[in-house]
């Protein structure tokens, strides 16, 4: 069993299908990618919202995160980029965009805070 450091309160964790990579989302707005075999942090991304949920794609090339701040939700999409040279491999996270999410109800004309969330 390994303990990963550097995160404040972790709110979500996702493990890649092949059990090689762990992604964590935290209260401090950080999204971190860890190598499971040795517990080393590979890369991270910082946002200004609490990260409530993280998911990693099957091919380990993309991360989707759901964040919230002051009852406003945002979907964050990140691309995992690996750069290889003869001597080293670096891994970085690049923003692939984000979308604000709004509450929506088909039974009302306007947004409702108690309604399910849909992408705008």
Image (cartoon, rainbow, N blue to C red):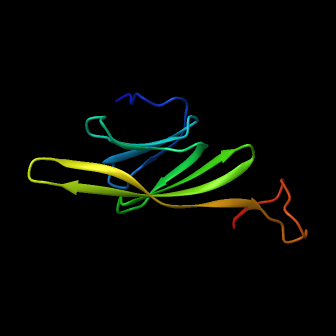
Q: Residue at horizontal 29%, vertical 50%?
A: 91
Q: Quadrant of the C terminus?
A: bottom right
Seen from the viewer's position, the closer of residues 55 and 66 is 66
Q: Residue at horizontal 63%, vertical 54%?
A: 74
Up-down: is 68 above or below 38? below
Q: Residue at horizontal 80%, vertical 65%?
A: 104
Up-down: is 76 above or below 109? above
Q: Along the horizontal axis of the image, is 35 left or right of 14?
A: left
Q: Along the horizontal axis of the image, is 73 left or right of 35?
A: right
Up-down: is 31 above or below 118? above
User: Residue farthest to the right?
Assistant: 108
* Res. 1 visible in picture: no
* Res. 53 visible in picture: yes
Figure quadrant of residue 75? bottom right
Figure quadrant of residue 18? bottom left
Q: Position of residue 109 (x, y in %)?
A: 90, 70
Q: Position of residue 119 (x, y in %)?
A: 67, 66
Seen from the viewer's position, the closer of residues 97 and 51 is 97
Total label count?
0
Q: Quadrant of the N terminus?
A: top left
Q: Position of residue 30 (x, y in %)?
A: 50, 40
Q: Position of residue 98 (x, y in %)?
A: 56, 60
Q: Along the horizontal axis of the image, is 7 left or right of 116?
A: left
Q: Along the horizontal axis of the image, is 71 left or right of 105?
A: left
């Amino acid at each position: 069993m390994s303990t990963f450091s550097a995160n404040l309160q972790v709110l979500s964790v996702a493990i890649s299908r092949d059990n090689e990579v762990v992604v964590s989302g935290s209260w401090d707005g950080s999204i971190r990618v860890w190598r499971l075999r040795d517990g080393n942090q590979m890369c991270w991304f910082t946002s200004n919202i609490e990260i409530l949920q993280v998911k990693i794609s099957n091919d380990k090339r993309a991360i989707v995160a759901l964040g919230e701040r002051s009852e406003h939700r945002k979907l964050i999409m990140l691309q995992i980029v690996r750069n290889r040279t003869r001597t080293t491999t670096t891994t970085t996270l690049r923003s692939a965009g984000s979308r604000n999410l709004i509450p929506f109800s088909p039974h009302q004309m306007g947004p409702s805070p108690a309604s399910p969330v849909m992408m705008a």
